[in-house]
Image (cartoon, rainbow, N blue to C red):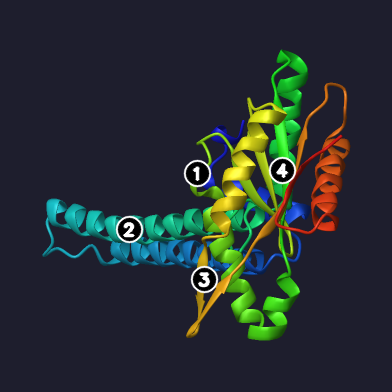
């Protein structure tokens, strides 16, 4: 159905969608769309006025072919302006969609996209009996990084950790920012023992990650909680089990991975 809608209809639907209320790009899109329609209205008015005067003047020095060529040039100019606005609206539409599903700092999937993807994967598990593992990741002692080096340094650490976590994932895996210094990994077609092997490689490799903060080398570690989805369980149940396993890793001394019960 969306493919059958024109770009203007899609933009209008997007502006009316309450899911984007308060989004900083929504106001920009609304203003640009209003300006676009006003420009079209003015161009239509100018065209009508121009046509009227041309019909009254009937310049005898212009042949029919010359008048036709002049009008074609005017129409081509209007078409180019219209195409430019169409491209700008399309780009803003894409930017708004990206901003609504991705974390602005790390570029990873945000909580909304993670939950949508997790619902879809769990639905597939329920239909096909496939394996799915969920991993909760929390950067150890992150508050100390902020306190010691400042929040800009903390942001840099999160960006580098995000890049590291998704570096070795498969194309159909998903790494997202759950919130703060927490990340969530979705590993389809992966049972718990396989997920633990993946997580252990990540955990040990993160020890070697060196992040330059000004002229200081900062190293970090993380605690991991792994939960394999159980058939019949809800999305929240699976996430809570992964979160509980991660907290168990924290309590056991951090820089550990724990498998949910």
Sequence-first tag of 1 and 3: 1
Please rate how many residues cluster around mark 4, counting C-alpha atoms within 10 Å: few if below 14, some from 14 to 19, many from 20: many
Sequence-first tag of 3 and 2: 2
Rendered-image quadrant of the C terminus: top right
Q: CA distance from mark 2 to mark 1?
A: 45 Å
Q: CA distance from mark 4 to mark 3?
A: 23 Å
**Which residue in the structure is indicated by mark 1?**
168
Q: CA distance from mark 3 to mark 2?
A: 48 Å
Asked whether the residues under the numbered discs 2 and 1 touch, taking CB atoms below 8 Å apart as contact, a structural biologist would say no
SS at mark 3? strand
Q: Position of residue 63 (x, y in %)?
A: 12, 56
Sequence-first tag of 4 and 3: 4
SS at mark 2? helix
Residue 80's tag is 2
Q: Nearer the viewer, residue 89 or 233?
A: 233
**Which residue in the structure is indicated by mark 4?**
135
Which residue is rendered at x = 64% and y = 75% of the image? 154
Rendered-image quadrant of the N terminus: top right
Residue 211's tag is 3
Residue 105 visible within the image: no
Residue at far top of view: 128
Q: Position of residue 42 (x, y in %)?
A: 47, 68
Circle nearer the viewer, 2 or 1: 1
């Amino acid at each position: 159905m969306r493919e059958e809608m024109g770009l203007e209809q899609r933009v209008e639907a997007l502006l009316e969608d309450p899911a984007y209320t308060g989004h900083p790009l929504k106001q920009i899109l609304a203003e640009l769309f209003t300006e676009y329609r006003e420009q079209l209205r003015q161009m239509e008015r100018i065209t009508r006025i121009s046509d009227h005067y041309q019909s009254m003047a009937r310049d005898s020095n212009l042949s029919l072919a010359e008048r036709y060529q002049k009008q074609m040039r005017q129409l081509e100019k209007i078409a180019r302006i219209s195409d430019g606005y169409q491209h700008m609206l399309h780009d803003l539409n894409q930017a708004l969609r990206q901003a609504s599903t991705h974390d602005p700092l790390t570029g990873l999937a945000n909580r909304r996209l993670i939950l949508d993807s997790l619902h879809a994967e769990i639905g597939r598990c329920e239909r096909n009996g496939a394996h799915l593992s969920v991993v909760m990741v929390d950067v150890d002692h992150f508050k100390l990084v902020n306190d010691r080096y400042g929040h800009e340094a903390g942001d840099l650490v999160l960006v580098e950790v995000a890049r590291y976590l998704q570096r070795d994932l498969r194309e159909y895996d998903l790494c997202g920012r759950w919130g703060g210094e927490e990340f969530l990994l979705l590993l389809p077609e992966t049972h718990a023992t396989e997920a633990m092997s993946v997580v252990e490689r990540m955990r040990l490799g993160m020890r070697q990650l060196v992040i330059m903060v000004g002229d200081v080398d900062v190293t970090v570690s993380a605690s991991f909680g792994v939960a394999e989805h159980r058939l019949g369980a809800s999305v929240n149940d699976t996430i809570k089990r992964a979160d509980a396993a991660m907290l168990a890793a924290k309590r056991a001394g951090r820089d550990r991975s724990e498998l949910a019960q």
